[in-house]
Amino acid sequence: KKWKTGSPSDSQNNNGALISKEHLEKVRGFVALAKSEGAIIHCGEGVDQLDLPAHNKSGYFMPATVISGLPDSSRVMQEEIFGPV
């Protein structure tokens, strides 16, 4: 929960925005899939709200998300998500 998301120009942030709206939706889709398969979402997408400055609110930011409780055979565990999951 201490992992900060925001502008990469701020050295206090650990991760920045994703490349596009489509990519953000793809990564969110993996989190939704994990949840539908019974995963525990410990923090991040769907659990925590991002507190972004106004000039970053239109970006494609997603909080670092920690998931557990899925078998290794799960699609979420087998595919590269290319996002903060």
Image: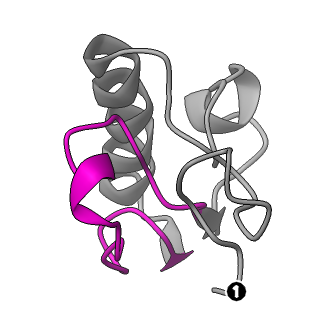
Q: Main secondary structure of the magenta part?
A: loop
Q: Nearer the viewer, residue 16 or 32?
A: 16
- Residue 66 magenta-drawn? no
Q: Is residue 82 left or right of residue 29?
A: right
Q: Is residue 24 above or below residue 40?
A: above
Residue extending furthest bottom? 2
Find residue 28 and report its horizontal and vertical position in percent: 35, 39
Q: Which residues lie in the magenta part?
A: 42-65
Identity of the residue drawn at 41% across and 45% down: 61
Mark 1 residue type: Lys
Identity of the residue drawn at 71% across and 74% down: 3
Q: Nearer the viewer, residue 53 or 68?
A: 53
Q: Secondary structure at mark 1?
A: loop
- Residue 49 magenta-drawn? yes
Find residue 6 and report its horizontal and vertical position in percent: 53, 56
Location of the N terminus by quadrant is bottom right
Q: Is residue 3 left or right of residue 19?
A: right
Find residue 74 and report its horizontal and vertical position in percent: 62, 36
Find residue 44 and report its horizontal and vertical position in percent: 48, 69
What colour scheme was applied to this rendering of the protein? one colour
Q: Is residue 28 above or below residue 5?
A: above
Identity of the residue drawn at 20% across and 40% down: 58
User: Which residue matches tag 1?
Assistant: 2
